[in-house]
Image (cartoon, helix red, strand yellow):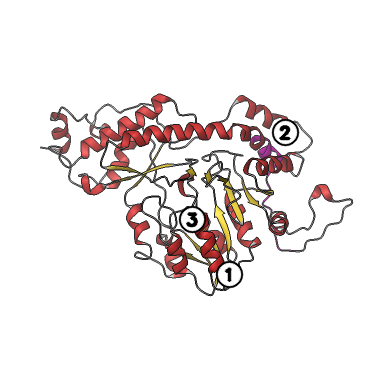
């Protein structure tokens, strides 16, 4: 008897869409989606009709509002979050012979930015409950070459910046520069303090999947005037003065920089989106609460731990699925959820396991065992502010349906295999 036949005869288990059953939803629900309204469209249209498409007045206006929202002294806008990370590593003075410690549980751009400036990334393992970098693992990874720490606010929860600051200040040759990769956590708080004020530099991503978008875009927040000046030069070819500050045709290139500027068109979208950010985070938190309540009754599915004193931004909602309690592998679970109409994803393949990092730095399995074990269980569920109550119920129903079908105590289950 096939697994599909066995599940069909078990009255408590609905037939999965991968076996020809009716999916939970016909319209595919992505894991993330931008929220664009008529006000946003009008703002961008006004920019297009203005005299300035780039290097105009909307860029500094957006930077000013972004700094005010976060409480940072400076916000320096970039063309992408990756460009902002590159700018931050350069502003910190990282270069050949230096090392920076980061987490393997991140998108590759975090570590890539260290490589861009000729330095070497080192990886410290994570906490299994939060998937955030462990300060004690960071302390153990420090060498005389370490110059910076790059914690990541995974899924939207700020890292333990108090403990990381202690580690940075006590390091040999310290204090080390802390560059927070807050691509997931704009609007979150730690100990009552806003993201943007917790590190020496804080990097944001404004990609469409993020909580606030400028299409593509990023920014670096800092209270340090010197860092801000270096960042502005770096994004503008290394030129010492911004266009608006020049009195004639002359300019001086004093550093090697890049064209990493954000446009006025993109800044117009950011200016329009920023006032809606707080309410969108509240909605994300409400969805997260509903998920957490539902999954508390499903022993095979674990929501991540929320640390005390943290307000989570929930860019992502990630769960760990205990595959040892199911009769399928993660690939089959993933495929089954997508066939039910739920656009699950996985965040992230640990950076040190990518071919580039294995070949360039001799890294591989065993370096960060907690991250490696967690990766095998991760599933990212849909999370965005425009989700309807029905969308949220559909996600929960699909998780229950797929877990129920593959639960090891179900009769006639499919054995683990990777052929789907």
Location of residue 213 (image quadrant): top right
Q: What residue is shown at x 89% (from left), y 50% (from top)?
A: 247
Q: CA distance from mark 1 to mark 2?
A: 45 Å
Name the foreground residue: 329 vs 228. Answer: 228
Residue wearing tag 2 = 47
Residue wearing tag 1 = 174
Q: Position of residue 383 (x, y in %)?
A: 44, 36
Name the foreground residue: 72 vs 35. Answer: 72
Q: Which mark is residue 108?
A: 3
Q: CA distance from mark 3 to mark 2?
A: 33 Å
Q: What residue is shown at x 31% (from left), y 30% (from top)?
A: 397
Mark 3 or 2 closer to N-term?
Answer: 2
Q: Residue furthest left?
A: 1
Q: Position of residue 110 (x, y in %)?
A: 52, 56
Which range is magenta? Answer: 255-269
Q: Residues within 10 Å of mark 2 (few under 14, many from 20)?
A: many
């Amino acid at each position: 008897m096939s697994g599909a036949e066995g599940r069909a005869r078990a009255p408590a288990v609905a037939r999965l869409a991968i076996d020809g059953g009716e999916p939970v939803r016909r319209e595919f629900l992505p894991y993330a989606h931008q929220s664009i309204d008529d006000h946003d469209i009008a703002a961008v249209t006004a920019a297009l009709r203005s005299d300035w498409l780039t290097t105009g007045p909307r860029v500094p206006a957006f930077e000013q509002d972004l700094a005010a929202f976060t409480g940072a002294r400076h916000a320096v806008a970039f063309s992408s979050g990756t460009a902002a990370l590159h700018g931050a590593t350069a502003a910190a003075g990282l270069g050949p012979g230096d090392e920076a410690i980061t987490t393997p549980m991140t998108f590759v751009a975090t570590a890539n930015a260290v490589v861009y400036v000729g330095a070497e990334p080192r990886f410290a393992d994570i906490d299994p409950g939060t998937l955030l970098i462990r300060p004690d693992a960071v302390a153990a990874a420090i060498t005389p070459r370490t110059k910076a720490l790059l914690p990541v606010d995974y899924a939207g929860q700020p890292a333990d910046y108090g403990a990381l600051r202690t580690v940075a200040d006590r390091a040999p040759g310290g204090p080390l520069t802390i560059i927070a990769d807050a691509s997931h956590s704009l609007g979150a708080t730690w100990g009552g303090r806003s993201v943007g004020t917790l590190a020496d530099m804080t990097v944001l991503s404004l990609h469409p999947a993020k909580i606030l978008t400028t299409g593509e875009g990023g920014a670096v927040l800092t209270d340090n005037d010197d860092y801000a000046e270096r960042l502005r030069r770096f994004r503008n070819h290394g030129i010492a003065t911004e266009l608006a500050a020049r009195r004639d045709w002359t300019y001086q290139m004093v550093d090697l920089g890049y064209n990493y500027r954000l446009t006025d068109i993109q800044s117009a979208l950011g200016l329009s989106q920023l006032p809606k950010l707080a309410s969108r985070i509240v909605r994300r938190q409400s969805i997260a609460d509903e998920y957490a309540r539902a999954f508390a009754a499903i022993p095979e599915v674990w929501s991540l731990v929320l640390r005390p004193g943290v307000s989570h931004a929930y860019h992502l909602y990630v769960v760990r699925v205990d595959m040892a309690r199911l009769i399928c592998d993660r690939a089959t679970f993933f495929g089954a959820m997508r066939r039910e109409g739920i656009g699950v994803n996985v965040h992230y393949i640990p950076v040190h396991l990518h071919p580039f990092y294995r070949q360039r730095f001799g890294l591989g399995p065993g370096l960060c065992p907690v991250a490696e074990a967690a990766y095998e269980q991760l599933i990212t569920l849909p999370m965005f502010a425009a989700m309807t109550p029905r969308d949220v119920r559909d996600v929960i129903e699909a998780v229950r349906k797929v877990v129920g079908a593959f639960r090891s105590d179900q009769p006639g289950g499919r054995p683990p295999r990777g052929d789907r």
